[in-house]
Amino acid sequence: MSTEKTDQLKFRTRAIHVGNEVDAETGAVVPPIHMASTFQQPGAGEWGEYDYSRSGNPTRAGLQRTLASLDSGCGALAYSSGMAAIHGVMMLLEQGQHVVAGCDLYGGAYRLLHKICSRSGIEVTLVDLTDLDAVRAAIRPETKLLWGETIGNPLLSIPDLKGLVAIAKEQDILFGVDNTFGTPALIRPLEMGVDIVMHSATKYLGGHSDCLAGSIAVSDPDLFDRLYYIQNATGAVLDPMSCFLLSRGLKTLDLRVREQTKTAGQLAAWLETVPGVRRVLYPGLESHPQHALATSQFDGHGAIVCFEIDGDFKQTAKTCKATELFRLAVSLGAVESLIEQPASMSHASYDPADRERFGITDRLIRLSVGLEAVEDLQADLLQAIKQGLAS
Ligand SMILES: *Cc1c(COP(=O)(O)O)cnc(C)c1O
């Protein structure tokens, strides 16, 4: 099918067909996995479509076509992890340049910026991205990149993407977002004028907790070339087996995310009525500070729910340990539900002072809602909260 024709197809259809063309040689409806690390060349100093798998691999190329299509980009790159993808973006910067990033950032991104990029003389300022004036005030002449998450982590804050795009354009800086929590099923930031969209594909895109991967998509071919150059030079590409697993996961992305979002909405509303729960954070609840923005900006409110219990650090840890269906684990976005305590797990790499300042309390619990029946998840949470608070 021609590119013009596939562009007309709906998201769900493209997730299955773009990049998954029937194998011309065998008719296989699932493209073969190309494990080759090197490819025979037409002649010395002559180059075919592929030469060496770090620079290009047919399995990765198919996946990248799917990713670009789902993110509405001109191209996409598949990385060995989400962190490798973020690092690829940060390597666009040079010594002395500055990044403005959201204050409830993924713990690993916080560490990358503060402990690794800082070594190369790249400075970072964290700001509340829901406050556009604060963002504008944080931008300096050396600022080159604005970096945020479409749904903040773990407080599920929602930045106004159109407002941030306007600031980035007016200041002539790049604007990149980590859309891991949002997923391209619910929001496609490139369509709103964002320059770079990144995913930890380990989460919803893969969807089955069995593959570590990252992706970047952009709509500017020159920016794509710069990111490709960095990736090829530094080597954090996705291996063929993981490319296959990710391609397979993407085929059901839309269905999974919609169903998980539905269950998450039901759980969030129910949690607000549970004794011992003091605050529920979910963009789909009217009590969420950016509820109206979230509703207009996204096609659904996502499948991460956070809540605080009436307990201390220990009781919160105990609640997380007491669940039987929710697995006590970091990560998110897969078919099985997960539970974690951000203060001791996903956000342990924050300085305690920054955790305190940004409201990541000891009693906060984060749920990644999977595909189990909502009744079973409710019963599991109820018994765990009772056990945790009884101690
Ligand atoms: C997991 C995660 C990452 C890092 O991705 P890895 O695949 O673990 O390297 C980055 N951002 C967010 C929001 C994440 O949840």
Image (cartoon, helix red, strand yellow):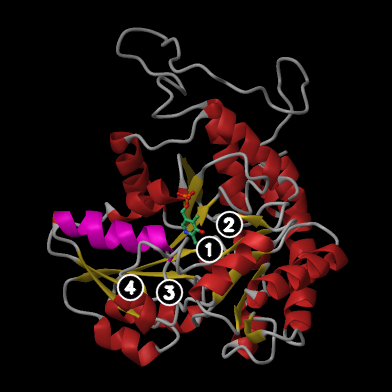
Which amino acid lies under the numbered mark 3 shown in the image of this protein?
Asp
Badge 2 element:
loop
Q: Position of residue 255 (x, y in %)?
A: 79, 56
Q: How many marks?
A: 4
- Neighbor class of circle 2 (other Cα within 10 Å; few <14, some 14-19, many 20+) is many
- Residue at 57% x, 21% y: name it: 34
| Spatial separation of the CA atoms under disc 1 and disc 3 | 14 Å
Q: Which mark is residue 352?
A: 4
Q: Secondary structure at mark 3?
A: loop
- Mark number, residue 71: 2
Camera-side mark, 2 or 1:
1
Give the Cα separation between the discs numbered 2 and 1.
Answer: 10 Å
Main secondary structure type of the part rendered in magenta: helix
Residue 314 lies within the magenta run = no
Sooner in the amino-acid sequence: mark 1 or mark 3: 3
Q: Give the distance between the C-alpha atoms of the residues marked 4 and 1, in whole angstroms.
A: 26 Å
**Residue 134 image position (x, y, % from top left):** 33, 89
Q: Secondary structure at mark 1?
A: loop
Disc sitting over residue 104 in the figure: 3
Mark with earlier residue (3, 2)? 2
Q: Quadrant of residue 142?
A: bottom left
Q: Which one is in front, 99 or 262?
A: 262
Provide residue 129's location: percent of width, then percent of height: 41, 81
Can residue 376 be seen? yes
Tag 2: residue type? Asp
